[in-house]
Every structure is written in C-alpha cells, then in structure tokens.
Image (cartoon, helix red, strand yellow):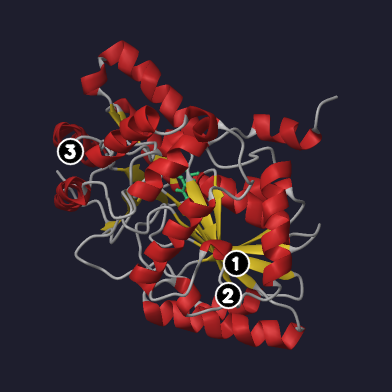
Amino acid sequence: MISEKMIKLTQGNSVIRAMFEEGKKLAAIHGHENVYDFSLGNPSIPSPSAVNAAIIDIVQNEDPISLHGYMSNIGYPEVREEVALSLNKKFDTKFDKNNIIMSVGAAGGLNVVLKTLINPGDEVIVISPFFVEYGNYVNNYDGKLVIVPACRMDFRPNPETLLAAVTKKTKAVILNSPNNPTGVVYPEETIKALAEVLEKKSKEYGSPIYIISDEPYRELVYDGINVPFIPNFYKNTIVCYSWSKSLSLPGQRIGYIALPGDLDDFDLIFDAASIATRILGYVNAPALIQRVVSRCLDEQTDIDAYDANRKLLYNGLKDLGIEAVYPQGAFYLWLKTPGSDKEFITSAKKYNLLMVPGSAFTSPGYARIAYCVSYETIERSLPAFKKLAEELKLIS
Ligand code: PLP
C-alpha cells in the first residue's frame, strides 16, 4: 500500500488544475479563441527583456563549471547579498546575506519554513479564503490547519477573530497580501492590529508565534497602493518571496526566504531551514536563475497590462449586475455568485467561461477569475458573461 496521505490527495485532486484540464478539452472542441479560461494564475505577460538578456550574457560569459555546479544549500552568497541590499533599499531594513536563503519559489520557501517550525499537532492559522496548497503543505509536516475567516466586507483578517483562534499550540499564521484569491492588500492598520494580537498571545503562552508572509504578488499592485513590509511591524515574521509573478518566471522556480536578525531563535531557525532545503530534496534553488534574478532586482513585469484587464473585467461585470471585490493587487477578481458557487460555475461552463468556485478556497458563494490573460480574451468573454447574466436573471 502506498502512502495513505497521498491516496487521499489523489481523491481530492486540485479543483483549479481540473478546471485547467477541462479548459484544454473545451478548446479542442470549440477552438482556443472561443474558450475563456480564467482558472489558472499563470502570468500572461512575458518577462522583462532584461531577464533573457541576463540569461544569454551569463551563459555566454561565465565559467560553465561553477555556473552549473553544486553550491551551498542556501544559495550563492553574492546573490543573497544583492537580495538583502535590495530589500534594505526598499524597506529600510538591515539585512545582509545571512538573513536570506534562496528558495524554489514561494512554494519551496513555505515548505522549508513549515518543515523548520512545525512539530506534529502544531497549529498553523490561515485566513480564509486562502491559497489551497497551504493545507497540503501544513499536512506534509503533520501540522494542523486552522481556518480563520476574513471579514466578509473587505476580506481583511479580523484581529478579534484571530485572537479567538490562537491557542497554546499556534506555531504560525500565514498571511498573503496582495491576496490570492481576493486581490485585497492588507493595510498598515490591519497588520499593526494583527501584530498586537500575536505579541500578546506569544507573551501569554511564553513561546513565539511566527507570521509567515507569503509574498508572490508583492509588486503586483494598482493605483500606487502601499504593501506594508510585515517584518517592520512584527519582528517574528519570516518572508517567503517569489519571482514567479513579478518577473513572470513561475516555471523557473525561484524565490527567497528572508529571516530578520531579531527573529526569536534566529540561529536555530536559519540553520534548520538550511538543512530543510536539502532534505526536502530541493538541495538548492536553481543556479542559473539565481544569478539572473540578482541582475534583475529592479525589474518588473508590465503591471499596466494587468491593470487594463482589471478595469475592463470589473466594470464589464458590474454592468451585468455581477458584484465583485475591486482588486487592489495580484491578478484575481473575487466575485460573489448570485446563488451557489457550484451552480454558477456549471452555468458559466455552458458559455465556455471557466472560473474556480469559492468552495475550492473554503469560501462557498464566491468565484475566482484569474485575469492574467490577454486583453482580447476579456473583451471577447464579455458577451459570454452577458449570456450568463441573462440566464441567471441578473439583467433582462
Ligand atoms: N502562494 C500563493 C498565494 C500563490 O498564489 C502561489 C502561486 O500561485 C504560490 C504561493 C506559489 O508560488 P511559486 O510559483 O512561487 O511557488
């Protein structure tokens, strides 16, 4: 018999991936241009040209043996130093290379951090709706996922609800802002209020509760909105960053973990995380792309293209009587389904509209549209949404 945990996972395979597969099937029947696949958060904008230029230059000019060789598990020291300096410039922090571990995307970073922190039965709080994989990651290390709903008005975490959920066993709280799936950015006042709760509870129980800040969308924000850097508000914060979205590099698997020097048990955590990187089988973050991102730290994807999509989609749906959260960041639109989300998704499929039901994010009654598609796809999808709105009697 194979792993029981894995058998369970094969039975409840990801709804998002299933949608994506369905999209491919529908495209084969109706033609790619007639299927509106909003299921997957795969960036639709190419990486900045500096990325390819760096790849070519590095491959042509650096010593191939050291370029492709093994390295320290935590990554190239000079890359970690560049990342630290860039963070210091942006957030007025005091990092150096000894605060940074290069990771295999945010997913790799989160797994390293959870492996490092969790003892069996430890609780990890997540704010619902949340990125579904958190459940699998916490389960990998026999932790217990504790789901705390965000406020239904603005989808920000509510400090009082958090306070009620923290127990002696709480080891960490995962925060994700800009948020997948809601597109909400948590403002400074929310972060401060959450920090106050966690400080109080850490003191009461005599053991630190860590914030794990999952930040793959940090730079993907609109209208110049500020994304507070959480370590500046709560010292026991571990940041898991990724270039998957900010440089459109999800297949290259590159990110970092930032561990502030005043973190409780810093030395232990840093050393254990370095070992976790190895024993989880990542060994080290991919070599070539580490060097590439270190040359592109001031580069960014074309946020204006996502912004145009955001406005077109939000306003188009609003005109059809479909209510949604106006996204402040990331590339997701979180809409309220008029009836059950499952029925909404089934009706939408009739018009070749593919979205993910809120139930997949533990929030029934909503649906997520990933608008990281071409502008033309959104333009062409609006008549299909109109038909859906007519069927649901949102418009006549
Ligand atoms: N966290 C969130 C909230 C995400 O949306 C994603 C990917 O979509 C990840 C983590 C994983 O990102 P990465 O590709 O960097 O592993």
Looking at the image, the residue that sits furthest to the top is: 29
Could you say which disc has been placed on residue 386 in the image?
3
x and y percentages locating residue 392 in the rendered image? 27, 42
Q: Residues within 10 Å of mark 3 (few under 14, many from 20)?
A: many
In the rendered image of this protein, does residue 300 appear above or below residue 213? above
| Residue 374 image-quadrant placement | top left
**Left or right relative to 122: residue 302:** left
Helix or strand or loop: what does disc 2 sit on?
helix
2 or 1: mark nearer the eye: 1
3 or 2: mark nearer the eye: 2
Label located before the other in sequence (2 or 1):
2
In the rendered image of this protein, does residue 235 appear above or below residue 356? below
In the rendered image of this protein, does residue 258 appear above or below residue 396? below
- Three-letter code for the amino acid on which mark 1 is drawn: Val
Q: Which residue is mark 2?
A: 162
Label located before the other in sequence (3 or 2):
2
Do the residues bearing badges 2 and 1 touch, measured as CB atoms within 8 Å? yes
| Residue 289 image-quadrant placement | top left
Helix or strand or loop: what does disc 1 sit on?
strand
Question: Residue sitting at 28 percent across and 38 percent down?
Answer: 47
Distance between the alpha carbons at the discs numbered 1 and 3: 40 Å
User: Along the line of sight, which residue is nearer the eye, 209 or 314?
Assistant: 209
x and y percentages locating residue 58 in the rendered image? 37, 34
- Three-letter code for the amino acid on which mark 2 is drawn: Leu
Distance between the alpha carbons at the discs numbered 2 and 1: 9 Å
Label located before the other in sequence (1 or 3):
1
Q: Which residue is mark 1?
A: 173
Do the residues bearing badges 3 and 2 touch, measured as CB atoms within 8 Å? no
Q: Quadrant of the C terminus?
A: top left
User: Along the line of sight, which residue is nearer the eye, 178 or 28?
Assistant: 178
Do the residues bearing badges 1 and 3 touch, measured as CB atoms within 8 Å? no
Question: Residue sitting at 36 percent across and 32 percent down?
Answer: 61
